[in-house]
């Protein structure tokens, strides 16, 4: 078995780290965890030990870097007997499309609602662009749940990489009290009750760093 080490940033703020970490937890594969605090001198001093890309997350596999969150999830899926994507072909294609859209889109949501697990009840102005992102996410969730998710509480029934990719959005919606429809509300409740998500949130609550660049809302 290859030795796996996952390098991540602050659990309170690093949404891309959460995606890789949650997939790693759900894979059932043993891995070591290295935490590098974002925007700190130690980050710049040490990130080069793991990747020249200069970003987290990074998965080290016997000393070789896998440095993109989706690539990390795909590698974990291969190592975990392909159980991190839906088994049915069309559901799998839909889940991959949902992940790709999150991976490359929703820029307004990312900037207006930065992930901040410790914060509660923050309020931000919801303009047209942000509302469009929020509505689109609820549409993706609703279609996944209606067409493919009847067998369980995750987007496609059983946990998949799509849930890892949208977990930071659920935490954002919670932090900023974003109004959601009934389907999204049930999905959020399911994800927030998950033991691994609760572990992540508890660890985030213990962090002391405050990154002013990520503190949005009032």
Image (cartoon, rainbow, N blue to C red):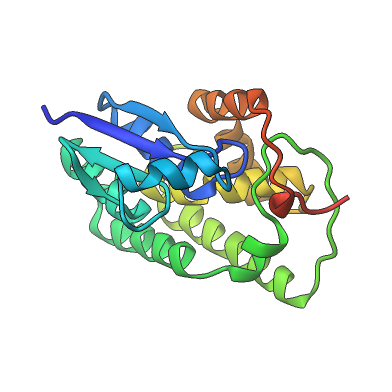
Residue 145 image position (x, y, % from top left): 49, 52
Image quadrant occupied by the N terminus: top left
Number of marks = 0
Residue in view at x 31 percent, y 56 percent: 52
Q: Residue at x 68, y 43 (%)?
A: 116
Say which residue appears at 34% left-offset and 55% top-offset.
68
Name above or below for residue 93 compared with residue 117.
below
Above or below: residue 99 compared with residue 156: below
Could you say which quadrant of the image residue 101 lies in? bottom left
198 up-or-down from 53: above or below: above
- Residue nearer the viewer, 85 or 18: 18
Q: Residue at x 18, y 38 (%)?
A: 63
Q: Compare residues 34 and 78 and report the one nearer the observer.
A: 34
Residue 99 horizontal/vertical position (percent): 41, 59
Residue most toward the bottom?
128
Relative horizontal placement of residue 12, taking residue 88 as reference (left or right): right
Q: Position of residue 10 (x, y in %)?
A: 55, 38
Asked whether residue 83 appears in the rendered view, the answer is: no
Residue 44 on image: x %, y %: 46, 47
């Amino acid at each position: 078995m290859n030795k796996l080490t996952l390098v991540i940033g602050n659990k309170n703020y690093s949404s891309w780290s959460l995606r890789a970490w949650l997939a790693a937890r759900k894979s059932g594969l043993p891995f070591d965890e290295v935490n590098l605090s974002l925007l700190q001198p130690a980050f710049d001093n040490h990130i080069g030990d793991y990747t020249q890309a200069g970003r987290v997350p990074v998965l080290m596999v016997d000393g070789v870097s896998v440095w993109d969150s989706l690539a990390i999830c795909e590698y974990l899926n291969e190592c975990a007997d392909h159980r991190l994507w839906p088994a049915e072909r069309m559901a799998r294609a839909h889940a991959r499309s949902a992940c790709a859209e999150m991976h490359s889109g929703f820029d307004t949501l990312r900037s207006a609602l930065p992930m901040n697990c410790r914060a509660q009840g923050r309020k931000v102005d919801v303009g047209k662009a942000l509302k469009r992102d929020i509505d689109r996410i609820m549409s993706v969730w609703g279609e996944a749940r209606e067409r493919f998710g009847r067998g369980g509480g995750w987007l496609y029934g059983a946990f998949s990489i799509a849930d890892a990719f949208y977990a930071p959005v659920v935490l954002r919606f919670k932090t900023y009290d974003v109004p959601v429809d009934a389907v999204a509300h049930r999905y959020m409740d399911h994800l927030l009750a998950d033991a691994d998500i609760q572990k992540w949130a508890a660890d985030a609550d213990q962090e002391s760093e405050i990154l002013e660049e990520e503190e949005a809302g009032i």
